[in-house]
Amino acid sequence: MIIFIELTLKYASRRYNKEFGRLKVGFDLLLVSSAALLSLAMSGTIDGIREGTAIAALTTGYMVTFLSIHIFSRRNLNRLLSIIPVRR
């Protein structure tokens, strides 16, 4: 299920020409806020959502953007592959 959601976000970022990290942060915040509202409506208190959930929702998209630009770029991967000996 999670892979389907991530692929949908990736498709939406390409389709609407938006940055994936920002789209992911917005979607994660939407999920966290809807979970909080549902918890509040059903039980009268917010259960299961604490500061770690909010921090993860706010930072995951930006970490993915940073890693994809600086670590997993084609230039860095080619440099890494040139260092590692490949048997043929």
Image (cartoon, grey):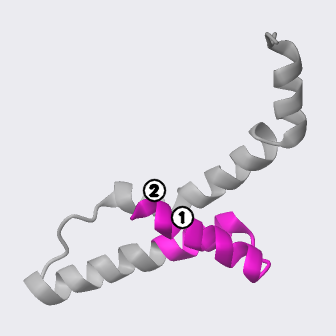
Q: Residue furthest bottom?
A: 41
Residue 47 drawn at (x, y percent): 17, 69
Give the secondary structure at mark 1: helix
Q: Is residue 71 above or below residue 31?
A: above
Question: Which residue is outermost to the front?
Answer: 88
* Residue found 37% across the figure and 79% down from its top: 33
* Range of residues picked out in magenta: 1-28
Neighbourhood count class around disc 1 (C-alpha, 10 Å): few under 14, some 14–19, many 20 upward: few
Q: Quadrant of the C terminus?
A: top right
Nearest to the observer: residue 68 or residue 34: 68
- Whether residue 34 sits left or right of residue 6 in the image: it is left
What residue do we see at 55% from left, 57% from top? 59
Q: Is residue 4 magenta?
A: yes
Q: Quadrant of residue 79?
A: top right
Circles 2 and 1 in contact, beta carbons < 8 Å? no
Q: Amino acid at mark 2?
A: Ala
Name the spot of residue 32 as percent of width and height, x first.
Answer: 37, 73
**In whole angstroms, how far apart are the C-alphas of marks 2 and 1?**
15 Å
Q: Which residue is mark 2?
A: 56
Location of mark 1 (residue): 6
**Callout 2 secondary element:** helix
Depicted 25 relative to depicted 55: above or below = below
Please state if 54 lies on the left or on the right of 60 as rendered.
left
Judge whether 36 appears above or below 10 on screen.
below
Q: Is residue 33 left or right of residue 10?
A: left
Amino acid at the residue labelled 1: Glu
Q: Position of residue 84 (x, y in %)?
A: 80, 13
